Image: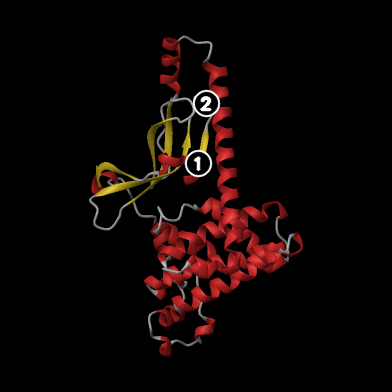
Amino acid sequence: MEPEQLKVSSQRWMSGALAAFSQGPVSHDFAVHHAGVAAEHLLKAYLASLHPALIVEGQDFNSLLHATGHGTLASVDLSRAKTIGVVEAHKRVHGLLRKQLPIDAKTFLPVAVARNGVAHLGIHDVAEVQTVFTTCLRVIDPLLSELQIDPKIYWGDYGQLHDMLIAKHIEEALIDLESKLVKARAIFAQRYGHLSPKEREVVLATITRPQPSPTHGEHVEEALCPACGSRGGLIGETHVLAGDEFVTFAPYAFACSACSLDLDGDEELGDLAEEVPIDMPIDEYYADWEPDEDMYRDR
């Protein structure tokens, strides 16, 4: 549960992952598995740097005893302590480092699937190897900064390979985004190009009103569509930062009913992904919130 030990372990696993990746498809199963372990250990290193209790299973009392410095009272050895999985580790860190870690749960999930597939069944989706591998690199990069780890030391002899994979990802992401925008503009022109400006304004006014989310904790804000300029819905989660008197809105997706543009994740949202405060006091915004009785009963 020591952050320093987890940092060293992460670097060792990543060195093995990069070596395997550079050997080609014959070793790609090792690459995705080792990269997933490296990402998990560095995620946990960050949490443990705040407090070791943040990486243990909350329901396991013996693990909590070890994490809080009372291991002598535990009935099992430290080696048998139960810690959270990689998905939960990412979820916790992403909640703390929203701006620094632009990899949401949906984007990160294939990492866990690939790593577990190799570990438990010896299989993985060969079509997703580079995506999974690059996602691990993108998760690790901001954590190196947060943990004050020198990237040159961490990546070692594979720094150039890391840079090439990140650059290729950025290029592909930009191409995918531009393809979405071009398609959305074509749809908009097909649907409304024959209408006069006045007619178009009337039609769009009736169909571009974002609907509120039925899920509490989610929020929808109106925003202009980057493809057609119509009013679209910016969907995100709300949270309250320590010391704030207002609710903060963190967007994660955008949808436009006028041109069918659908953006997902910080990379596609661009400037739309910026967190903004909602001009409403916390008590007023959450006035109709009721606790989940099942959740509290489970706890």
Residue 268 circle label: 1
- SS of the residue under disc 2: loop
Is residue 282 rendered to the left or right of residue 193?
left
Label 2 to label 1, Cα distance in Å?
16 Å
Is residue 276 rendered to the left or right of residue 143?
left
Residue shown at 54%/25% (left/top)?
185
Residue shown at 73%/62% (left/top)?
123
Q: Amino acid at mark 2?
A: Cys
53 up-or-down from 125: above or below: below
Quick check: can you spot residue 110?
no
What is the x, y in percent for residue 176? Answer: 59, 39
Residue 65 circle label: none
What is the x, y in percent for residue 169? Answer: 58, 49
Instruction: Using the image as rendered, state which of residue 89 and residue 181 is in the foreground.
Output: 181
Residue shown at 45%/30% (left/top)?
225
Q: Residues within 10 Å of mark 2 (few under 14, many from 20)?
A: many
Q: Which residue is mark 2?
A: 259
143 up-or-down from 214: above or below: below
If the image is split into quadrants, where does the C terminus sit? Answer: bottom left
What is the x, y in percent for residue 121? Answer: 72, 66
Instruction: Using the image as rendered, state which of residue 215 and residue 110 is in the foreground.
Output: 110
Q: Amino acid at mark 1?
A: Glu
Residue shown at 42%/60% (left/top)?
295
Quick check: can you spot residue 142?
yes
